[in-house]
Amino acid sequence: MKKGPPVSIYNEVTSANGTVEYVIVSYRRENENVPYLDLQQTRDFYEKDVGTSILPWKRNISWSNFIQILKVFVLSDTVPQDRNTTDRVFNLLDLDRSGSISIDELQRFFKIFNLNCTNTFLKELIKQYDENNNGKLDKTEWYQLITSGRSRRLIEEAYKRLHDEYQI
Protein backbone atom coordinates (compact mmCIF):
# COMPACT_ATOMS: atom_id res chain seq x y z
CA MET A 1 0.00 0.00 0.00
CA LYS A 2 1.31 3.45 -0.92
CA LYS A 3 2.01 5.73 2.03
CA GLY A 4 -0.30 8.71 2.27
CA PRO A 5 0.83 12.27 2.91
CA PRO A 6 1.85 13.27 6.44
CA VAL A 7 -0.85 14.49 8.77
CA SER A 8 -0.05 16.55 11.86
CA ILE A 9 -2.21 16.24 14.94
CA TYR A 10 -2.07 18.84 17.68
CA ASN A 11 -3.59 17.98 21.08
CA GLU A 12 -3.50 19.90 24.30
CA VAL A 13 -4.77 19.11 27.78
CA THR A 14 -6.01 22.07 29.78
CA SER A 15 -6.67 22.53 33.49
CA ALA A 16 -10.01 23.69 34.91
CA ASN A 17 -8.85 27.31 34.65
CA GLY A 18 -8.05 26.91 30.95
CA THR A 19 -4.27 26.76 31.23
CA VAL A 20 -2.61 24.40 28.79
CA GLU A 21 -0.85 21.78 30.94
CA TYR A 22 0.33 19.29 28.33
CA VAL A 23 0.82 19.36 24.60
CA ILE A 24 1.35 16.53 22.10
CA VAL A 25 2.17 16.91 18.44
CA SER A 26 1.92 13.71 16.43
CA TYR A 27 2.77 13.07 12.83
CA ARG A 28 1.38 10.10 10.98
CA ARG A 29 0.67 9.08 7.42
CA GLU A 30 -2.85 9.69 6.15
CA ASN A 31 -3.64 5.98 5.81
CA GLU A 32 -1.82 4.82 8.97
CA ASN A 33 -3.01 4.86 12.57
CA VAL A 34 0.39 4.76 14.29
CA PRO A 35 2.31 8.04 14.49
CA TYR A 36 5.90 8.03 13.31
CA LEU A 37 6.72 11.07 15.44
CA ASP A 38 5.38 12.22 18.80
CA LEU A 39 6.62 15.42 20.40
CA GLN A 40 5.43 15.97 23.95
CA GLN A 41 5.93 18.69 26.54
CA THR A 42 4.31 19.45 29.91
CA ARG A 43 3.98 22.91 31.42
CA ASP A 44 5.49 21.78 34.75
CA PHE A 45 8.57 20.27 33.13
CA TYR A 46 8.97 23.19 30.72
CA GLU A 47 8.70 25.83 33.44
CA LYS A 48 10.97 23.92 35.83
CA ASP A 49 13.51 23.43 33.06
CA VAL A 50 13.25 27.08 31.99
CA GLY A 51 13.66 28.27 35.58
CA THR A 52 16.79 26.22 36.13
CA SER A 53 18.19 26.46 32.62
CA ILE A 54 21.48 28.23 32.07
CA LEU A 55 20.57 28.40 28.39
CA PRO A 56 19.24 31.88 27.56
CA TRP A 57 17.07 30.68 24.68
CA LYS A 58 14.93 28.70 27.12
CA ARG A 59 14.47 31.61 29.49
CA ASN A 60 13.30 33.86 26.66
CA ILE A 61 10.25 31.84 25.58
CA SER A 62 7.53 31.44 28.21
CA TRP A 63 5.21 28.43 28.20
CA SER A 64 2.25 30.42 26.86
CA ASN A 65 4.44 31.92 24.11
CA PHE A 66 5.82 28.49 23.29
CA ILE A 67 2.24 27.19 22.82
CA GLN A 68 1.39 30.09 20.49
CA ILE A 69 4.50 29.49 18.39
CA LEU A 70 3.92 25.74 18.28
CA LYS A 71 0.33 26.11 17.10
CA VAL A 72 1.37 28.33 14.20
CA PHE A 73 4.20 25.99 13.19
CA VAL A 74 2.16 22.79 13.41
CA LEU A 75 -1.24 23.93 12.22
CA SER A 76 -0.14 26.25 9.42
CA ASP A 77 -1.10 23.84 6.67
CA THR A 78 -4.51 22.91 8.11
CA VAL A 79 -5.73 26.06 9.87
CA PRO A 80 -5.63 29.35 7.93
CA GLN A 81 -3.27 31.76 9.66
CA ASP A 82 -4.23 35.42 9.71
CA ARG A 83 -1.63 38.15 9.51
CA ASN A 84 -2.16 39.29 13.14
CA THR A 85 -1.41 35.78 14.46
CA THR A 86 1.70 35.31 12.32
CA ASP A 87 2.94 38.80 13.23
CA ARG A 88 2.44 38.07 16.96
CA VAL A 89 4.43 34.81 16.68
CA PHE A 90 7.08 36.59 14.59
CA ASN A 91 7.51 39.11 17.43
CA LEU A 92 7.83 36.27 19.97
CA LEU A 93 10.64 34.68 17.96
CA ASP A 94 12.39 37.99 17.17
CA LEU A 95 14.03 38.14 20.59
CA ASP A 96 16.49 40.92 19.75
CA ARG A 97 13.68 43.06 18.24
CA SER A 98 15.69 43.57 15.04
CA GLY A 99 12.64 43.21 12.80
CA SER A 100 13.83 39.88 11.45
CA ILE A 101 14.22 36.28 12.63
CA SER A 102 17.77 35.02 12.51
CA ILE A 103 19.02 31.46 12.36
CA ASP A 104 19.88 31.62 16.07
CA GLU A 105 16.39 32.79 16.98
CA LEU A 106 14.79 30.02 14.91
CA GLN A 107 17.07 27.44 16.53
CA ARG A 108 15.85 28.48 19.98
CA PHE A 109 12.38 27.24 19.19
CA PHE A 110 13.57 23.91 17.77
CA LYS A 111 15.86 23.28 20.74
CA ILE A 112 12.86 23.18 23.07
CA PHE A 113 12.09 19.76 21.58
CA ASN A 114 15.80 18.84 21.47
CA LEU A 115 15.72 19.30 17.71
CA ASN A 116 19.18 20.67 17.10
CA CYS A 117 18.96 22.01 13.58
CA THR A 118 22.26 22.76 11.96
CA ASN A 119 23.01 26.21 10.61
CA THR A 120 23.19 24.65 7.14
CA PHE A 121 19.69 23.20 7.47
CA LEU A 122 18.22 26.51 8.63
CA LYS A 123 20.14 28.49 6.00
CA GLU A 124 18.65 26.21 3.33
CA LEU A 125 15.18 26.84 4.74
CA ILE A 126 15.58 30.59 5.08
CA LYS A 127 17.08 30.85 1.59
CA GLN A 128 13.80 29.58 0.10
CA TYR A 129 11.88 32.56 1.55
CA ASP A 130 14.61 35.20 1.96
CA GLU A 131 13.71 37.54 -0.88
CA ASN A 132 16.23 40.23 0.10
CA ASN A 133 19.04 37.67 0.63
CA ASN A 134 20.09 38.95 4.06
CA GLY A 135 20.08 35.48 5.68
CA LYS A 136 17.10 36.33 7.90
CA LEU A 137 13.32 36.34 7.65
CA ASP A 138 11.46 39.65 7.81
CA LYS A 139 7.71 39.72 8.56
CA THR A 140 6.66 39.33 4.93
CA GLU A 141 9.06 36.43 4.35
CA TRP A 142 7.94 34.83 7.63
CA TYR A 143 4.30 35.13 6.61
CA GLN A 144 5.09 33.40 3.30
CA LEU A 145 6.85 30.57 5.15
CA ILE A 146 3.91 30.04 7.51
CA THR A 147 1.16 30.29 4.91
CA SER A 148 3.01 27.92 2.58
CA GLY A 149 2.52 25.10 5.13
CA ARG A 150 6.26 24.50 5.14
CA SER A 151 6.65 25.31 8.85
CA ARG A 152 4.95 22.06 9.91
CA ARG A 153 7.33 20.13 7.72
CA LEU A 154 10.29 21.91 9.33
CA ILE A 155 9.68 20.15 12.62
CA GLU A 156 9.26 16.87 10.80
CA GLU A 157 12.47 17.37 8.79
CA ALA A 158 14.43 18.45 11.86
CA TYR A 159 13.32 15.31 13.69
CA LYS A 160 14.17 13.13 10.69
CA ARG A 161 17.67 14.60 10.53
CA LEU A 162 18.13 14.03 14.26
CA HIS A 163 16.80 10.48 13.85
CA ASP A 164 19.14 9.73 10.96
CA GLU A 165 22.16 11.31 12.64
CA TYR A 166 21.75 9.55 16.00
CA GLN A 167 19.97 6.37 14.83
CA ILE A 168 17.03 7.04 17.17
Image (tube, grey):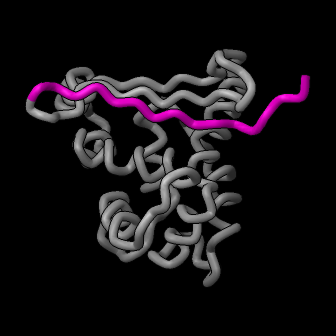
Quarter of the image with the C terminus in it: top right
Image position of 53 (left or right of 8): left
Indicate the position of residue 166 as horizontal and vertical percent values.
68, 20
Image position of 19 (left or right of 31): left
Boundaries of the magenta span: 1-16
Residue depicted at x 31% and y 59%: 92
Q: Is residue 50 magenta?
A: no
Residue depicted at x 28% and y 25%: 13
The answer to which of 97 and 3 lies nearer the viewer is 3
Indicate the position of residue 67 as horizontal and vertical percent values.
32, 42
Please identify the quarter of the rendering in which residue 49 is found.
Answer: top left
Residue depicted at x 23% and y 43%: 64
Farthest right residue?
1
Indicate the position of residue 52 as horizontal and vertical percent values.
20, 27
What is the total number of numbered labels drawn onto the structure image? 0
The answer to which of 120 and 68 lies nearer the viewer is 68
Image position of 108 (left or right of 43): right
Farthest bottom residue?
132
Quarter of the image with the N terminus in it: top right
Please identify the quarter of the rendering in which residue 134 is found.
Answer: bottom right
Farthest left residue?
17
The answer to which of 4 and 99 lies nearer the viewer is 4
In the displayed structure, would residue 123 be above or below residue 67?
below
Residue depicted at x 66% and y 21%: 36
Q: Is residue 14 magenta?
A: yes
In the displayed structure, would residue 40 be above or below residue 112?
above
In the displayed structure, would residue 138 be above or below residue 104?
below
Image position of 165 (left or right of 70): right
Please identify the quarter of the rendering in which residue 118 is found.
Answer: top right
In the displayed structure, would residue 103 be above or below residue 10?
below
